[in-house]
Image (tube, rainbow, N blue to C red):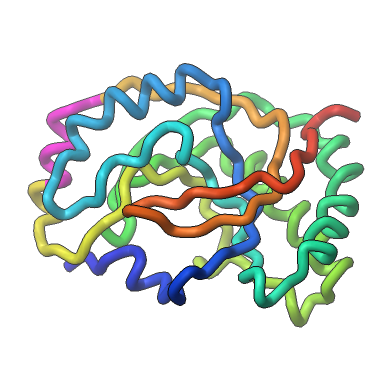
Amino acid sequence: MAIDHFLTRRLKDNQVDWNFNVVFEGQSAVAEMAQQYAPALQHSGLYKPIAPQWMHATILSMGTTEDFTEQEMLAVAVKLEPILASLKLPEFNFDSWWLWGGNVVLHISPEDEFTKLYDAVISALEQVVGPERTAKTPHGKFIAHTSLAYTRSHDKEHSLHDQLVAHPVKPVSFKVSYLPLLRQWAHDGHYEWEVIKKIPVGSG
């Protein structure tokens, strides 16, 4: 039984979060892949497929705008700048899909390289706000993934699985050239955001 993604998040009305997400701006292969998946995501157990401009890979959701000020988050971004500039990350791949709590997600590999972004954010956040105020991944360990569609509450995961199996899509690659600091909120079955600051990756 899948439980509505937005109920499991226990979001408050009009909640706005501070996030660092990898986004896929200007990467046409990712947009084309999303369009190819779209027919297989037409299912009563899912919200609408996430439009390419709102696809992302969450690195860390740090807390709400009530938990942290913009000044604090910009200070985290400053701490991140030299760390991210020094990273030499490879090209990444979406190598497989799975149903995670009912959500349709793509795994990102190589995961150990992608995890360097998470480790960098944790390090910078702890330096600015302290370990006791630093949120960690809720999954126990960082899991590199991107969601294609979020789940509603339903008990039709077998039919959704079969629908996806019958509609194979060729994996694609992407690059990470910057990591944005975002103000993010839920809207109409997906997440939207405002970019506060872009931090270059691998520019050093």
Which residues, given as a range, are shown in magenta? 160-168
* Relative to 85, residue 157 above or below: below
Task: Identify the image quadrant of the N terminus.
Answer: bottom left
Of residues 104 and 62, the one nearer the viewer is: 62
* Relative to 128, residue 38 above or below: above
At x 42%, y 70%, the residue is 9
Q: Can you name the residue that lies furthest to the bottom here?
A: 132
Q: Is residue 123 visible?
A: no
Q: Is residue 101 magenta?
A: no
Counting from the top left corner in percent of width and height, residue 149 is at 31, 46
Counting from the top left corner in percent of width and height, residue 152 is at 22, 60
Q: Is residue 167 magenta?
A: yes
Horizontal side, residue 176 vs residue 41: left or right: right
Task: Identify the image quadrant of the C terminus.
Answer: top right
Horizontal side, residue 150 vs residue 29: left or right: left
Of residues 74 and 115, the one nearer the viewer is: 74
Of residues 177 and 53, the one nearer the viewer is: 53
At x 46%, y 76%, the residue is 12
Of residues 91 and 61, the one nearer the viewer is: 61
